[in-house]
Amino acid sequence: MAWTDERVELLKTLWAEGLSAAQIANKMGGVTRNAVIGKVHRLGLSGRATPAKPQRGCGPTLARREETAPVAAKPQQRQEMKPVIPEPESITALVLDSGDLTTVATIKNNMCKWPIGDPARDDFHFCGQPAGTGKSYCTYHARMAFQPPQRREPVRRPAAAQIAQRRAAG
DNA sequence: CCCTGATTCGC
DNA sequence: GCGAATCAGG
């Protein structure tokens, strides 16, 4: 199984989506998680999970990284990811004439590869809208790809606090 | 023991 | 460039 351009695109998409290397390898097939990780490294996509990884420390290794790039932590769960992928109503996934959505198998090179839904689920599909030759996303998603998602404050539980306050108040 | 990614090294 | 083996952490 060679790493074709489309395969790499899919890899990058799923990797950016938050799928684990094993999950990506499983979805793509023909490759192991090691292969996925190796490719990810070669692509320079590494640095998603694992906040700090100085090196192996004790071992037959000598080279090391002098700097560590702390990145957003990744929620680690059991083969079920819940990525926060906004699904605006304005954007509707392209539905093929066959009735299928733009899935991993049907997506083409000139179609928007913006992931929609849970990659771990069966109904996971892509935007599929015309993305222009050589582009990975449609105009809308291309903007989103370059626009950092607005940071929402962590979900708080005002209910408990309010109850406590109400109790204290009277 | 299960999982995860990171790195090395032979091909 | 590729990926198994290995390492290291959760």
Image: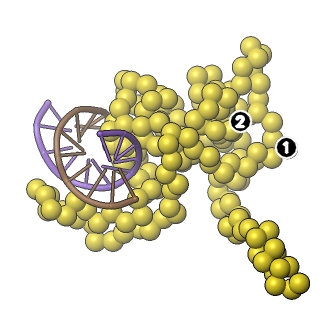
Chain colours: A yellow, B purple, C brown
Q: Residue at x 37, y 66 (%)?
A: A52
Q: Is residue A142 visible?
A: no
Count of numbered tags: 2
Q: Which label is found at residue A127?
A: 2
Res. A114 visible in picture: yes
The residue at 70%/32% (across/down) is: A128
Provide residue A29's location: percent of width, then percent of height: 43, 25
Contact between labelled residues 1 and 2, with CB atoms less than 8 Å apart: no
Compute the Cα span from label 2 to label 1. Answer: 12 Å
Numbered label attached to residue A89: 1
Residue type for callout 1: Glu
Quick one: quadrant of the N terminus of chain A?
top left
Q: Chain ID for label 2?
A: A
Residue A91 lies in what quarter of the image? Answer: top right
**How busy is the neighbourhood of tag 1: few (under 14 within 10 Å), some, or many (20 plus)?**
few
Which chain's residue wears label 1? A
Element at badge 1?
loop
Disc 2 or disc 1, which is closer to the eye? 1
Residue A18 image position (x, y, % from top left):
54, 47
Quarter in which the C terminus of chain A is drawn = bottom right
Q: Position of residue A43 (x, y in %)?
A: 41, 47
Q: Is residue A94 above or below residue A142?
A: above
Mark 2 or mark 1: whose residue is earlier in sequence: 1
Residue closer to the observer: A64 or A26:
A26
Quadrant in the picture for residue A109: top right
Relative vertical location of residue A142 with respect to residue A121 in this rendering, above or below: below
Q: Element under label 2?
A: loop
